[in-house]
Image (cartoon, rainbow, N blue to C red):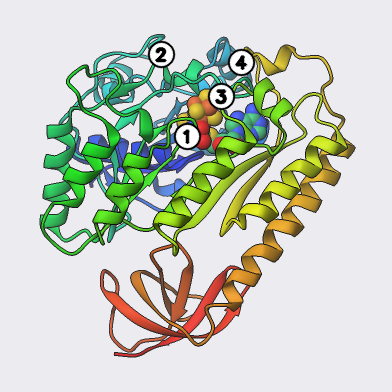
Amino acid sequence: MQKKYHIVTYGCQMNVHESEKIAGILHKMGYEETAEKENADIILFNTCCIRENAENHAFGNIGALKKLKKANPNLLIAVGGCMTQEKGKTDVLKKKFPFIDIMFGALNFEELERLIIKKQAQKKKVIEIREKEGEIVEGLKPFRTSYPNAWVNITYGCNNFCSYCIVPYVRGRERSRKMANIIAEVESLVAEGYKEITLLGQNVNSYGNDLNDGSNFATLLDKVASIEGKFRLRFMTSHPKDFTEEVVSVMKKHDKICKCVHLPVQAGSNRILSLMNRRYTREKYLEEVAFLRKALPQAEITTDIIVGFPTETEEDYLQTEDLVKTVGFASAFTFVYSKRQGTKAAEMEGQIDEATQKDRIMRLVALVNSLTREKSQKYIGKTVEILCEDYDEKKGLYLGRDEFGRMGYFSSKENKIGEFVNLKILSANGISLHGELTD
Ligand code: SAH
Ligand code: SF4
Ligand code: F3S
């Protein structure tokens, strides 16, 4: 019987895509996927450590495997991702969960096949974490599970050291893939029938800085968007300190590029932005938004915001609210600041108490939701192009997203997954739209 794997993924899109690469390695080794942990021969956790609750989630789920491992001692349990890259974390994991067989890191997941074979040949657990980033590994074929969408890495790591963020410590310095490799990957995805390509990096706008061959993000975007075929092109994440007018003109040049930008602002107060080491001001951010909207009036902007950063006063918080209203974000991911060991902000005085953090996040979520709802209402009566990406069994409806990432549901007798369809919007429910096919 074929051996089976089950992967549990936490964290960002980059991790989701890395799980597809891990799945690719396992398929090459002859494993197949199972949705049930109980049937698996190997269970892998691809972890995240961006906030404490991401870690707690993983801890809870790893702990729950104790029984399964007892019932089936041949079951292999592997833990990788960003959490194992944290200083001292493998020791914590070893103590808490002695039944883990393999630990690997976000910087060496490509070695998984060797690590599994090594574990199968010995009783002792295998713990191999790479401390520093290595050369980019090309040629791993991901087992993609999100047709018609496909993710493509353009950079790995991050050099920004925002004072609250652990990513530069666990993902290493920024490395850019060679342009030719990215283009070849997108070309083959389009030839295979993928309809939406998302270019991924912690800060896509600094693509090419380390290549010293003149490549930059605007030229990469231009070249990828020039690939023949009908597909949508997205990119994330854009750091406001590096978002250039050149990128906006490439967006304008190509219909394929979705006119939406994820531009995390994090805070509305200049004092907090400076403490966060974001290297832009509120005014610079608003200028970029104005420039984008002038060049592309239909453009939508989404963002990430943190509340409760050390020393944040009510006045600072209100500046964030004010900025949210001024920009009119299409949607926003909102987070309570989480103290991460080893970062600059963890050492700062003036950590904010939980009650204040809770109060601010609740007010911000209410504000963001009301803006999103307002935008959804404006869709009613309009016809939008949706790329159908899935079927919701519970609702009995197909779903997909428009250019701006807004979810639309509809019913259809035929399978529409992977097709662009026109949807007349009849109603809007919070952030999602409901409509009927017009063709
Ligand atoms: N590279 C991207 C985002 C990576 S992490 C960027 O710079 O925009 C995604 C989001 O998590 C960040 O934008 C930030 O809003 C949030 N985040 C990161 N560290 C955090 C922390 N310590 N506490 C709370 N939120 C955090
Ligand atoms: Fe973290 Fe800042 Fe890098 Fe984003 S840009 S990953 S928030 S350090
Ligand atoms: Fe992503 Fe979490 Fe790592 S957000 S880069 S998986 S710490």
What residue would you read off at disc 3?
279
**Disc 2 residue type?**
Ile
Q: How busy is the neighbourhood of tag 2: few (under 14 within 10 Å), some, or many (20 plus)?
A: some
Q: Ligand 1 is in which quadrant of the figure? A: top right
Q: In the rendered structure, which disc, 2 or 3, sits on the residue that comes first in sequence?
A: 2
Q: Residues within 10 Å of mark 4 (few under 14, many from 20)?
A: few
Q: Do the residues labelled 1 and 2 touch (CB within 8 Å)?
A: no
- CA gap, disc 2 and disc 3: 32 Å
Dot 4 amino acid type? Val
Residue that appears at 87% across and 38% down: 314
* Earlier sequence position, callout 4 versus callout 1: 4
Q: Is residue 334 above or below residue 161?
A: below
* SS at mark 2 in the image: loop
Q: Distance between the residues labelled 4 and 1?
A: 33 Å
Other-residue count near label 1 (Cα within 10 Å), few / some / many at <14 / 14–19 / ≥20: many
Disc 4 to disc 1: CB gap under 8 Å: no
Q: Is mark 1 within 8 Å of ligand 2?
A: yes
Of the two numbered discs 1 and 3 in the rendering, the one whose residue sits closer to the viewer: 3
Q: Residue 408: horizontal and vertical position, in percent?
A: 46, 74
Q: Name the residue under label 2.
A: 129
Disc number lying in front (1 or 2):
1
Which badge, 4 or 2, is on the more N-terminal residue?
A: 4
Image point 76% across, 42% down: which residue?
A: 319
The structure residue drawn at horizontal position 41% and vertical position 86%, both measured from the top left corner, is 411
Position above or below: 326 against 210: below
- The residue that mark 1 highlights is 239
Labels 4, 1: front one: 1
